[in-house]
């Protein structure tokens, strides 16, 4: 009876966490490399990407983003191609901290990181994230709220950084990043990401399985993401 109970508990735990056993969350060690992207870091912390953050290929990215969040291969490849150019030692792989390289993908005015001018363009910054998360007062984040939070963060970053320089590409990435968290943790068309899930990803770099999140059943496509970019941009004027 007792064993039956334990067995049932194990089965229900396995069902509650649909990821492979290899994909449990483990805090990175100080030798493990990480990036300025909270989602890429999250995938490394779950072992979808190499946990040490080293020697990541395009095929590693495509498999990891498909398996974890159902991001279309074409979408991963678009940003992955940029990521590969950040490595100074290889044309076919990069290390996660190579992504710190400024104005390839990394840009000023991040939602959770300081600008490169401050000397740390990489680490999660609790005070900056708190200033953004202060906009998220509801259980879900509407497109209008996403837009307002992003716009306020860009203004605050520009106000304290005399060298503030968000290029056209950087501005586009910044919109895409808001669209991505909306797609993964909300609806691919309407947004409305679950505030708690977004907070877990930014603060803990963990997929919020325990909080009820599941891999989206519909593939996240470039067209879908750009659709949300358009809506967030329209709500930003
Ligand atoms: C579902 C997929 C993804 C999601 C949800 C996501 C999410 C995000 C978010 C929300 C940010 C903004 C962080 C901030 O402003 O503080 C960000 C930044 C970044 N992402 Fe991702 N990302 C995804 C895929 C990728 C991929 C495939 C790459 C490249 C391999 C990448 C590279 C970066 C980099 C370099 C930044 C830093 C930009 C900056 O804020 O300066 N991301 N990502
Ligand atoms: C994408 O991930 C799903 C779920 O893990 C898997 O069944 C499918 O084979 C993957 N597709 C590719 C192209 O890797
Ligand atoms: C990367 O590719 C370029 C051009 O094809 C080549 O000149 C360079 O040697 C390559 N670098 C590495 C580290 O493989
Ligand atoms: C970006 O941030 C990292 C981590 O703090 C730091 O090592 C690096 O020097 C920064 N880049 C620049 C150019 O300041
Ligand atoms: C902003 O950054 C871009 C890309 O690094 C650079 O080409 C441009 O000159 C910079 N603008 C200013 C005003 O520094
Ligand atoms: C097999 C391989 O490419 N190893 C490389 C992984 O990344 C480290 C750090 O950049 C390199 O030193 C290795 O050569």
Image: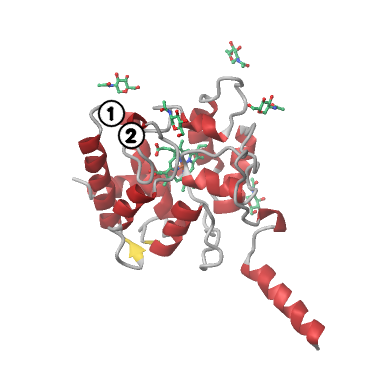
Residue 109 at what x, y percent from top left? 31, 38
Work out how far the residue at label 1 is from the one at label 2, CA to CA, in angstroms: 6 Å
Element at badge 2?
loop
Labelled disc at residue 175: none
Q: Quadrant of the N terminus?
A: bottom right
Neighbourhood count class around disc 1 (C-alpha, 10 Å): few under 14, some 14–19, many 20 upward: some
Residue 16 at what x, y percent from top left? 62, 70
The structure residue drawn at horizontal position 34% and vertical position 42%, both measured from the top left corner, is: 175
Q: Is residue 227 visible?
A: no
Left or right, residue 153 beside residue 79: left
Taking 114 as reference, is 219 above or below it?
below
Q: Quadrant of the C terminus?
A: top left
The residue pinned by badge 2 equals 108
Element at badge 1?
loop
Task: Find out if the beta carbon at label 2 lies less than 8 Å from the nearest ligand 1 atom.
Answer: yes
Labelled disc at residue 165: 1
């Amino acid at each position: 009876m007792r064993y039956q109970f334990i067995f049932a508990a194990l089965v229900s735990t396995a069902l509650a966490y649909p990821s492979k056993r290899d994909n449990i969350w483990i805090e990175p060690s100080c030798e493990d490399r990480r990036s300025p992207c909270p989602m890429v870091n999250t995938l490394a912390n779950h072992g979808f990407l190499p946990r040490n953050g080293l020697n990541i290929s395009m095929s590693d990215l495509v498999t990891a983003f498909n398996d974890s969040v159902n991001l279309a291969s074409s979408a991963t490849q678009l940003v992955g191609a940029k990521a590969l150019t950040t490595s100074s030692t290889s044309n076919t792989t990069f290390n996660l901290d190579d992504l710190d390289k400024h104005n390839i993908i990394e840009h000023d005015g991040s939602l959770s990181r300081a600008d490169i001018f401050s000397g740390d363009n990489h680490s999660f910054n609790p005070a900056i994230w708190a200033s953004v998360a202060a906009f998220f007062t509801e259980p879900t984040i509407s497109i209008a709220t996403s837009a307002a939070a992003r716009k306020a963060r860009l203004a605050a970053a520009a106000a304290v950084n005399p060298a503030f320089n968000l290029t056209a590409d950087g501005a586009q990435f910044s919109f895409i990043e808001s669209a991505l968290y909306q797609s993964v943790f909300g609806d691919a068309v309407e947004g409305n990401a679950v505030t708690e899930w977004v907070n877990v990803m930014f603060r803990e770099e963990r997929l919020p399985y325990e909080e009820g999140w599941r891999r989206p059943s519909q593939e996240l496509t470039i067209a879908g993401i750009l659709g949300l970019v358009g809506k967030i941009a329209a709500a930003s004027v």
